[in-house]
Image (cartoon, rainbow, N blue to C red):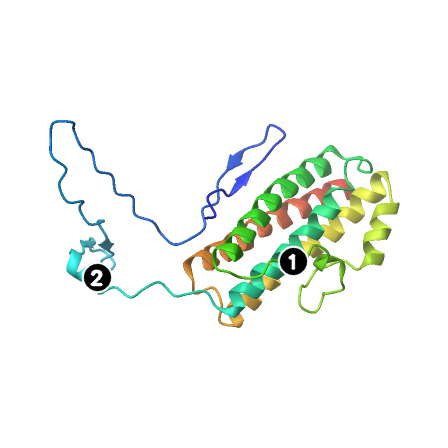
C-alpha cells in the first residue's frame, strides 16, 4: 500500500513515496540440510529519552503494544475529495502540451501529472482496502470549492483552455498555485476534523503537504522569472 512516492519523467529525478505504518522486515534463511525452526519475532526498538539509546522490546512487551489507530470518516472523506482534487489538476496539465510556450511550464506540468496520477492510484487502493466508496468519475466537475478548496469552476477551466502562449503560461501557474494551496488547506482540515491518526492516512497527508508546498515554491519562482 502506498509503495511509490514520485516518479518524475523527462530526464528528471525519480523519488519514492511510501505510505502506511512503519513496517518491520523479518527474513529467515534456511539451509537444505538444517531443520526449520520457529520464526523469530520482529525486533521492535523503543526509542530512548533524548541522549539515551533505544531498547529492544521483548515478545511479551510487543504483545502489550496498542494496535495502530484505525481510519476515521475524516480520513475517508479526505481521500475521496483529494482524488477529485487531483483529477482536476490532471485536467489542467492536460492543456499544457498544445498551449504552453515555456519549457519550464511544460516540465513542471509533467511532474505534477506524474506524481498526481500515482497518488490517485494510491488513494483508490487505500479506499478499496478499507471497503470505502470510490468517488464518481464526474465528482471533480461540480463546484466544490467550499469542501475542496482551490478547485477551479467550469468557467475558470474554460478560460484557461482558451488561452495560448505566454498568456497561458501565466494563467496556468496562477491557477495551479491556487489549486495546490487548496490541497494544503484540505490537509489542515483533515487534522482539524480528527483525522490523520491512522499511520497510512497521516503519512499520505504529510507527503501531500510537503510535496505540493515544494511545487508551489517552484511555480512562484517560475512566475517571477517569466514576469521579469
Residue displayed at 65% across by 52% down: 86
**CA separation in Å, label 1 and label 2:** 42 Å
- Relative to residue 216, is residue 210 drawn left or right? left
Residue displayed at 70% across by 54% down: 137
Circle 1 residues within 10 Å: few <14, some 14–19, many ≥20: some
Label pair 1/2, CB-CB below 8 angstroms: no
Q: Residue 106: percent from the left, percent from the top?
A: 72, 36
- Residue at the extreme bottom of the image, as rendered: 193
Where residue 63 is drawn, which disc sits there? 2
Residue displayed at 58% across by 65% down: 77
Whether residue 228 is visible: no
Q: Quadrant of the C terminus?
A: top right
Circle 2 residues within 10 Å: few <14, some 14–19, many ≥20: few
- Residue at the extreme left of the image, as rendered: 34
- Relative to residue 93, is residue 118 drawn left or right? left
Residue displayed at 63% across by 39% down: 111
Mark 1 lies on a secondary structure that is helix
Nearer to the camera, 41 or 51: 41
Q: Residue 166: percent from the left, percent from the top?
A: 83, 40
Point out the tag, 1 or 2, that comes first from the N-terminus. 2
Which is in the foreground here, disc 1 or disc 2?
A: 2
Whether residue 86 is visible: yes
Mark 2 lies on a secondary structure that is helix
Q: Residue 129: percent from the left, percent from the top?
A: 48, 55
Nearer to the camera, 35 or 143: 35
Q: Is residue 225 above or below residue 62?
A: above
Q: Which residue is mark 1?
A: 181
Nearer to the camera, 97 or 122: 122
Residue 151, located in which quarter of the rendered image? Answer: bottom right
Amino acid at each position: 500500500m502506498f509503495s511509490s512516492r514520485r516518479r518524475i519523467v523527462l530526464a528528471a529525478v525519480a523519488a519514492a513515496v511510501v505510505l502506511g505504518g512503519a513496517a518491520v522486515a523479518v527474513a529467515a534463511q534456511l539451509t537444505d540440510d538444517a531443520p526449520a525452526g520457529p520464526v523469530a519475532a520482529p525486533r521492535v526498538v523503543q526509542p530512548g529519552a533524548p541522549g539515551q539509546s533505544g531498547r529492544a522490546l521483548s515478545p511479551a512487551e510487543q504483545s502489550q503494544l496498542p494496535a495502530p489507530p484505525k481510519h476515521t470518516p475524516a480520513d475517508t472523506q479526505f481521500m475521496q475529495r483529494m482524488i477529485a482534487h487531483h483529477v482536476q489538476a490532471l485536467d489542467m496539465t492536460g492543456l499544457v502540451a498544445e498551449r504552453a510556450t515555456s519549457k519550464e511550464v511544460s516540465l513542471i506540468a509533467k511532474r505534477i501529472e506524474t506524481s498526481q496520477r500515482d497518488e490517485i492510484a494510491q488513494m483508490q487502493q487505500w479506499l478499496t482496502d478499507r471497503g470505502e466508496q470510490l468517488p464518481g468519475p464526474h465528482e471533480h466537475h461540480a463546484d466544490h470549492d467550499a469542501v475542496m478548496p482551490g478547485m477551479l469552476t467550469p468557467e475558470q477551466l474554460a478560460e484557461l483552455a482558451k488561452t495560448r502562449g505566454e498568456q497561458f503560461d501565466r494563467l496556468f501557474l496562477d491557477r495551479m498555485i491556487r489549486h495546490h494551496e487548496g490541497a494544503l488547506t484540505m490537509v489542515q482540515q483533515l487534522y482539524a476534523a480528527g483525522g490523520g491518526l491512522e499511520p497510512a492516512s497521516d503519512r499520505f497527508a504529510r507527503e501531500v503537504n510537503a510535496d505540493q508546498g515544494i511545487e508551489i515554491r517552484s511555480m512562484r519562482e517560475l512566475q517571477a522569472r517569466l514576469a521579469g
